[in-house]
Image (cartoon, rainbow, N blue to C red):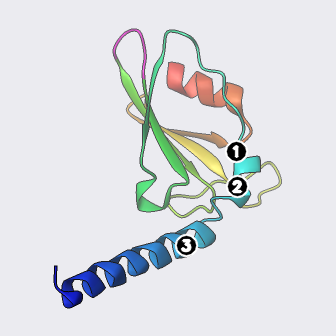
Amino acid sequence: MTPEEIKAIQDNARDRANALVYMEKRYKWRENIGVIPFIKFPADWEIQIIGPFSGAQCRFRVRRPDHEVKSVYLDMNCELGYFCDADGNEAAYWEVYPVDGDIGRCGINEVDQLLDLIRE
């Protein structure tokens, strides 16, 4: 490799690292670790973790025993849609698709409701 090629690789790696640091801070990935609840899924569901594209904090898919697949994401900042808590304030939410041919949403801590949406 030439010195120019080595420098280009180093510059590219530095640019990627800076972009990752920016995204981590922008979406508060580390801060939100303590905010996202643990979820106990039924043993007969298969869970596929997928990347957090389009502004979602996290995404996963669930394949139920009937082989239906549900897509789930967590939106911490109402970037992909809008959700209000009981007081009418913008709040973090889970979105499940499909739910009766549409979407279903529930608050971040409404884990039982999230599981119900996945079951529907």
Q: Residue furthest left?
A: 1
- Magenta span includes 64: yes
Residue at horizontal 58 percent and vertical 13 percent from the top: 42
Q: Nearer the viewer, residue 96 or 51?
A: 51
The residues tagged by marks 2 and 1 sit, at their Cα atoms, a distance apart of: 6 Å
Residue at horizontal 76 percent and vertical 48 percent from the top: 34
Identify the disc placed on residue 32: 2
Locate residue 88 relative to residue 72 in the image: left or right: right
Give SS at disc 2.
Answer: helix
**Percent position of residue 114, x then y:** 62, 31
Q: Which residue is mark 3?
A: 21
Q: Bounds of the magenta span?
A: 63-67
Locate residue 36 relative to residue 70 in the image: left or right: right
Dividing the picture into quadrants, the one containing residue 13 is bottom left
**Percent position of residue 27, x then y:** 60, 66
Q: Nearer the viewer, residue 88 or 67?
A: 67
In the rendered structure, which amino acid carries the disc numbered 1? Ile
Q: Which residue is mark 1?
A: 36
**Percent position of residue 81, x then y:** 52, 58
